[in-house]
Amino acid sequence: MTKVKLTPYITLEGQAKEAIQFYEQTLGAEVLGILTYGDMPNMPDTFTEELKVLIAHAQLRIGESELMLSDSPGPSAVEAGKRITICITTDSMQQSRQVFEALQQGGQVNIPFGEEAFSPGFGDVTDRYGVTFQVYTEVESGMEG
């Protein structure tokens, strides 16, 4: 049986680094991994230095739970319903793809399922009820350490 985990995912507008420090102080959060936009391969040359230092993906452990955060890379505000989403993590590409395809039925694909720098299989989809999910395939040498 493959592993499936649901994790709250918070998207902020340039405040993720500050939020991480806040959660470390107030909730005793432990940083499991941080990736900035500048750390990611194949980022567009149009990314400014200010944008490159923003958080593309961070993973925290708080007690027995995890929390993920990132900064929105665009200049516009984070859409209503996208500030907090749910990340579904599996350790199986097949299962991740099945979950993504099931959730997109009657819903809307925001980022098609495919390989990303941080995951061999990732996609972002809003289901028919307006709930946004990020489907993330975890690799052995990925964000968890």
Image: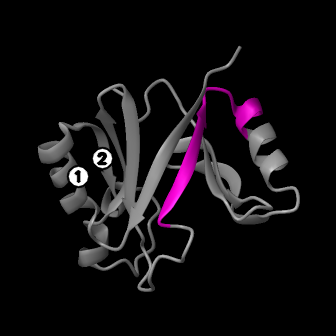
Tell me which numbered mark, 2 or 1, is placed earlier along the sequence: 1
Q: Does the magenta stretch include residue 86?
A: yes
Instruction: Confirm whether residue 118 shows in the render.
Output: no
Residue 109 spot, x, y in % from top left: 74, 64
Q: Where is residue 28 in the image (x, y as percent from the top left)?
A: 17, 36
Label 1 sits on residue: 20
Q: Which amino acid does label 2 sit on?
A: Ile
Whether residue 6 is visible here, answered yes or no, is: yes
Q: Which of 93 and 64 is in front in this view?
A: 64
Residue 81, placed above or below residue 28: below
Say the numbered circle drawn on residue 34.
2
Mark 2 → mark 1, Cα distance in angstroms: 10 Å
Identity of the residue drawn at 45% across and 73% down: 44
Q: Which residue is drawn at 43% across and 27% down?
A: 141
Q: In this view, does 137 lie to the left or right of 103?
A: left
Kind of residue indicated by mark 1 = Ile
